[in-house]
Structure formats: C-alpha cells, structure tokens
Image: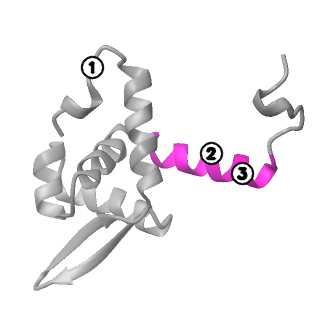
Amino acid sequence: MAASGGADADAPTQALDAAALMFGLLASPLRLHIVWVLAQGESDVTQLALRVGARAQAVSQHLARLKLAGAVRARSEGRHQIYEMTDPRLSASARAMLALAAPDVDADGLSA
C-alpha cells in the first residue's frame, strides 16, 4: 500500500530522529503529565509537583530534561523559576497520545 500523497520514499532519517526524540520526551508518565500541565499555562516547580502528585526534586529532574531538549523554558520570578512550554507541537503530541491511548476519555476534560 502506498503512503498518502503518492510517495513511496522512506522518511528522512533526520525527521525520524526528531520524532523519536519528541516521543522519548513523552515516554515517561510523569514527564507527560508535566507537559500536560504546562500546556495549560506556566507554573513553578512547587505547583507542578502538587498538580502531578510527585516530589519537587523529581519534577525538577524531568523539567531539566525538557529544558535541555528545548521543550520548556524558565524565567526567574523572585526566588522561583517559572516554567512554560516553548513548542506547542509537543503539547499537541501529548494530547494526541492521550486521545489514542484512552479514546473513551475526552482529552479536554482530563484533570491535570
């Protein structure tokens, strides 16, 4: 069966690598939850930890990985670091993965 658009060529290696990196970022349930929460708006580590039900140290480690990948950025606000998503495509991918994994659940109605 031919791929849509009539092209039978393989996907470019660079695109496959980028996609694998993105899906790798969402492979951890905790990181996926963090992305889900940040897709709704910016937050500091303490609030993220409360929302996702994890220790602040664990959340910070996952945020560091997301930041290294360029998926989130942080800004200082007093003594707090406020995190926000930098790429809406990652949020959209998270939403799509949740819809695929749990088709009976309205992704917009999921509580973070």
Front label number (2 vs 1): 1
Q: Is residue 91 above or below residue 7?
A: below
Earlier-in-chain disc, 1 versus 3: 3
- Is residue 59 or residue 44 the one in the foreground? 44
Q: Which amino acid does the dot numbered 1 rest on?
A: Val
Q: Which residue is mark 2?
A: 20
Q: Which residue is mark 3?
A: 15
Q: Secondary structure at mark 1?
A: loop
Q: Is residue 65 magenta?
A: no
| Residue at the image point whose x is 38% and y is 26% from the top | 99
| Residue at the image point whose x is 24% and y is 33% from the top | 108
Magenta span: predominant SS is helix
Earlier-in-chain disc, 2 versus 1: 2
Q: Is residue 44 above or below residue 7?
A: below
Q: Is residue 17 magenta?
A: yes
* The magenta segment: 12-28
Q: Residues within 10 Å of mark 1 (few under 14, many from 20)?
A: few
Q: Which residue is mark 1?
A: 105
Q: Secondary structure at mark 2?
A: helix
Front label number (3 vs 2): 3
Percent coordinates x, y for residue 10 in the rendering: 85, 38
Percent coordinates x, y for residue 67 in the rendering: 41, 67
Quarter the N terminus occupies: top right
Q: Can residue 28 be seen from the camera position used here?
A: no
Percent coordinates x, y for residue 88 in the rendering: 41, 55
- Is residue 35 or residue 30 the one in the foreground? 35
Q: Which amino acid does the dot numbered 2 rest on?
A: Ala
